């Protein structure tokens, strides 16, 4: 399809004896945010650099709306690397304008857009400051401004929240959501899985250069064989244990048990009610954080 966004098909890359990426495939449809997850060294950065043409693949294909990612297509992508790729001795505003011009903007367009993003990201007062004189968090904000200045249709963000304070992280989250709502596609990596779960409906999880799983977060959580039963009573109860599974938290008025998805949840809840007056009960699949740890542990 001509408008199917970013499509990565069976890409592989070896560096000497290291197989950095092996048969990785993923999609980022237009107007969507996809979280790209994995432990350090999993192959996320190699994949992102390959999208930008900075890594020559051994095999596989990468396309944007049905076209190879090269030439004019590349100017429609905003890339924020994990390692800062800016000029330390260049002033902030001049730098953002410079990258806008590289993406094909006129000088006036680049200047106007640079002013907008520096203001939005809270660094407009440092516009005439050398990049090297900024704090790490402010350098991260400038890096984001550079990736946004040309209003890209595809954003590739490698650990965009690293080093940001809560205010800056909130602004970053809002911008990512806004860009997707405006039709852009966003692929971003992060170790802050609470933010990933907040921003993304879908994730791709890799380890050791290989795809572990991908799909809608809710579907992946529901597919887990584990469930968490949480119970709270109005009064202390005698020592309570579930009919199935393992008790992980045991307090006078609260208990949490890990069950199998195949266990009789209703029977376990009835058993808890029989122990005392229940004021709160919930049954949930693992969180994204717990699911990630489970999958990565199994892959080691």
Image (cartoon, rainbow, N blue to C red):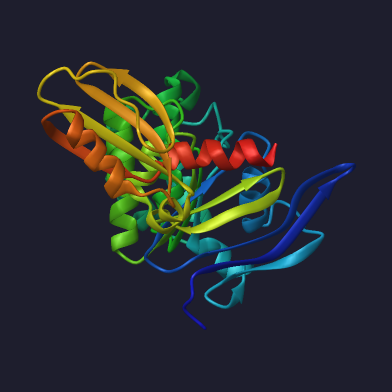
Residue 19 falls left or right of residue 142: right
Q: Is residue 121 visible?
A: no
Which one is nearer the viewer's eye here, 55 or 125? Answer: 55
x and y, in percent, of residue 104 in the image: 49, 62
Q: Residue at x 44, y 25 (%)?
A: 163
Q: Is residue 5 visible?
A: yes
Residue 259 location, quadrant: top left
Q: Residue furthest bottom?
A: 1
- Number of residue marks: 0
x and y, in percent, of residue 113 in the image: 33, 51
Q: Residue at x 44, y 36 (%)?
A: 245
x and y, in percent, of residue 136 in the image: 45, 22
Residue 135 falls left or right of residue 89: left
Residue 278 falls left or right of residue 38: left
Q: Residue at x 35, y 55 (%)?
A: 108
Q: Residue furthest right?
A: 17
x and y, in percent, of residue 230 in the image: 28, 34
Which one is nearer the viewer's eye here, 294 or 269? Answer: 269
Which one is nearer the viewer's eye here, 282 or 298? Answer: 282
Q: Is residue 154 above or below residue 45?
A: below
Q: Is residue 253 above or below residue 143?
A: above
């Amino acid at each position: 399809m001509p408008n199917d966004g970013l499509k990565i098909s069976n890409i592989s890359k070896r560096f000497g004896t290291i197989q950095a990426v092996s048969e990785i495939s993923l999609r980022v449809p237009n107007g969507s945010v996809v979280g790209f997850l994995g432990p350090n060294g999993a192959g996320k950065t190699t994949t992102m650099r390959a999208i930008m043409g900075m890594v020559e693949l051994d095999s596989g294909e990468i396309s944007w709306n049905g076209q190879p990612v090269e030439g004019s297509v590349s100017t429609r992508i905003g890339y924020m690397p994990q390692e800062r790729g800016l000029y330390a001795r260049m002033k902030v505003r001049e730098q953002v304008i410079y990258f806008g011009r590289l993406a094909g903007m006129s000088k006036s367009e680049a200047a106007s857009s640079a002013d907008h993003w520096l203001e939005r990201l809270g660094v407009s007062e440092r516009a005439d400051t050398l990049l090297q004189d900024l704090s790490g968090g402010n350098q991260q904000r400038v890096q984001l401004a550079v990736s946004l200045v040309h209003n890209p249709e595809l954003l590739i963000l490698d650990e965009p929240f690293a080093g940001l304070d809560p205010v800056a992280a909130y602004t970053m989250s809002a911008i990512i959501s806004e860009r997707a709502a405006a039709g852009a596609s966003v692929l971003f990596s992060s170790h802050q899985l609470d933010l990933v779960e907040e921003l993304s409906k879908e994730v791709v999880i890799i380890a050791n250069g290989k795809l572990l799983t991908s799909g809608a977060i809710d579907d992946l959580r529901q597919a887990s064989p584990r469930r968490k039963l949480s119970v709270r009573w109005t009064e202390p109860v005698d020592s309570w244990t579930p009919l199935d599974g393992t008790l992980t938290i045991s307090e006078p008025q609260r208990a949490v048990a890990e069950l199998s998805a195949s266990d009789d949840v209703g029977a376990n809840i009835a058993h808890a009610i029989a122990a005392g007056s229940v004021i709160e009960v919930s049954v949930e699949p693992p969180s994204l954080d717990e699911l990630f740890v489970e999958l990565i542990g199994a892959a080691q």
